[in-house]
Image: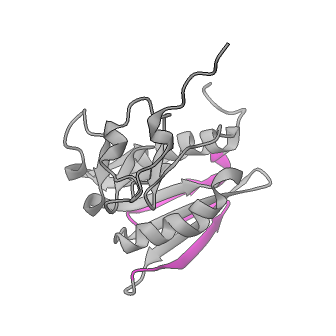
Amino acid sequence: MTAAPLPDWLTPPEEGYTAEDLDRIPDLPPHTELIDGSLVFVSPQSMFHMVVIDRLLAALKSQAPDGLVVIREMTMTLAPRQRPEPDLSIVTEAAIRSLRQTDLPVQEALLVVEVVSPSSEVFDRERKPQLYAAAGIPNYWRIEDEGGTVVIHAYALAPDATYKLDAVHRRQLETDRPFQISIDLSSLTDLFGTDW
């Protein structure tokens, strides 16, 4: 038995891939991101990652004011060779152009959220915040698993186009960025008081 041939896209072009290539390359794995012109593939997600994203999505949607939309796992084109996929994004309604769109316009983003996994630590703690800040996104949350406890590191965009730590939230999230939000963080990981 011979091995199946490898797809051509495993060998990137010399100048790297562009944001538009993500829509043209056939059979890419789900949730493929583009960082610095390179394709980035996700590892299987942990239960912590999945549950926190689901619960935070529901909590943010229930508190979002009219005109803002909370989106799960959709890429955002930041620059020609940068198209990451935040775990959650809060954007204005103007970001939603069509049911066929495959990315969000960065100029409509108010907040991006990443839940750190062992395989994404460097991207979520270092590279992605650099890219999001350079693109002008006003707020960035990095969510860490500290022994099964949700900890949110909230950053705000500074005038020098870098993020400055605004607050670290444990037990309770209380903020007015990008709108008034109040969430009991223990509810994000309570597996037994759920509807599943």
Let me know if residue 175 appears in the view. no
Q: Residue furthest bottom?
A: 160
At 37% across and 43% down in the image, what residue appears?
Answer: 22
- Up the image or down, 194 lies above or below 131; here it is above
List x then y, in percent, for residue 166. Answer: 53, 77
User: In the picture provided, is 57 more to the left or to the right than 107?
Assistant: right
User: In the picture provided, is 59 more to the left or to the right than 19?
Assistant: right
User: In the picture provided, is 117 more to the left or to the right than 154?
Assistant: right
Q: Quadrant of residue 110?
A: bottom left
Residue numbers of the magenta segment: 161-188
Front residue (pair 157, 37): 37
- Up the image or down, 133 lies above or below 58; here it is below
List x then y, in percent, for residue 150. Answer: 68, 55
Quadrant where the N terminus sits is top right
List x then y, in percent, for residue 90. Answer: 37, 54
Instruction: Tell me the colour scheme of the image.
Output: one colour
Let me know if residue 179 appears in the view. yes
Q: Is residue 116 magenta?
A: no
Q: Residue furthest right?
A: 147
Quadrant where the C terminus sits is top right
